[in-house]
Amino acid sequence: MASHTNNVAGLVLAGGQSKRMGRHKALVEVGGLPLLARACDLVKSAGGSVAVSVREEGPVAELAVSLGVTVVFDLPGSPAAALCGIVAGLLWAKSVGAGSMLTIPCDVPLLPADLPGRLIAAVVDAPCAAARTSRGVEPLCAIWRTEAIAVLQEECRAERQAPLHEILRKMQAAFVDCADPANFLNINTPQDVMLAEALMRDRGVAGGS
């Protein structure tokens, strides 16, 4: 089973529309770094190839290139949903020889540094694994074996696309329990940026401006 975790690729999900922020969240700085750069640094810690999932060409793709990572575009005709971005990412991960692919969203800057390693360990005995807190499953903070592509493609093509947390349970995912829900603070507004930076300062995290 351990061979499935060899050569873990990493995918940062950055295809959202960011309507409440007023500009793309991936470009917003938190603690002096763009959210996309923070997310890329975290997935790079897994040691494999790294890509950023985007809907189309634009400033987010340009930033990804400047960070030295691959850009993966959503498949033509796919709905604007994280699941289809994950499918495109898995096709890329398989093409670079990865046995599994870590996913994190670009807009969660407080994720613990040990999360990638814990997810990688959890997927040894399961087709996929995701983080979970007292608030519930965090389905975008997950890891997927590349052999799950066919199942996820079917879900992506379904007339009613099931939520990711339902898909994870249907696939009998493993779950990594995380003690502090605040680590999964999602940045949607300028107020969220201020809250994240305040939490960084409280925790003595470098970059909490």
Image (cartoon, grey):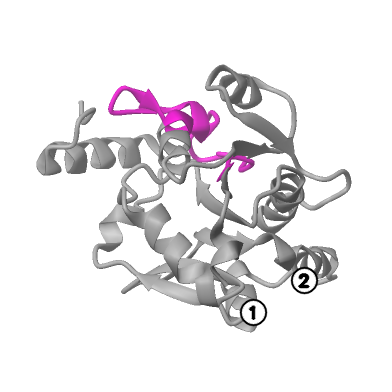
Left or right position of 208 against 135: left
Mark identifier at residue 16: none
Instruction: Locate residue 136 relative to residue 160 in the image: left or right.
Output: left
Q: Residue at x 58, y 69 (%)?
A: 128
Q: Amino acid at mark 1?
A: Met
Quadrant of the image occupied by residue 6: bottom right
- Residue 57: x, y in percent? 73, 25
The residue at 56%/17% (across/down) is 66
Residue 150: horizontal and vertical position, in percent? 81, 67
Hey, what amino acid is under mark 2? Val
Q: Relative to the observer, which residue lies in front, 142 or 81?
A: 142
Q: Is residue 177 left or right of residue 107?
A: left
| Above-or-below relation of 122 to 72 | below
Q: Mark on residue 171?
A: 1
The reply to whether discs 2 and 1 touch (Cβ–Cβ < 8 Å) is yes
At 64% across and 82% down in the image, what residue appears? 170
Query: Callout 1: 10 Å neighbours few (<14), some, many (20+)?
Result: some
Instruction: State the SS at label 2.
Output: helix
Magenta span of residues = 12-37
Numbered label attached to residue 151:
2
Determine whether the residue tagged by mark 1 lies in a helix, strand or loop: loop
Q: CA distance from mark 2 to mark 1?
A: 9 Å
Residue at 24 percent of width and 62 percent of height = 180
Quarter holding the N terminus is bottom right
Residue 35, magenta (yes or no): yes
Does 168 appear in magenta?
Answer: no
User: Where is residue 76, by image quadrant?
Assistant: top right
Query: Label 2 neighbourhood size at 10 Å, few (<14), some (14-19), many (20+)?
Result: few
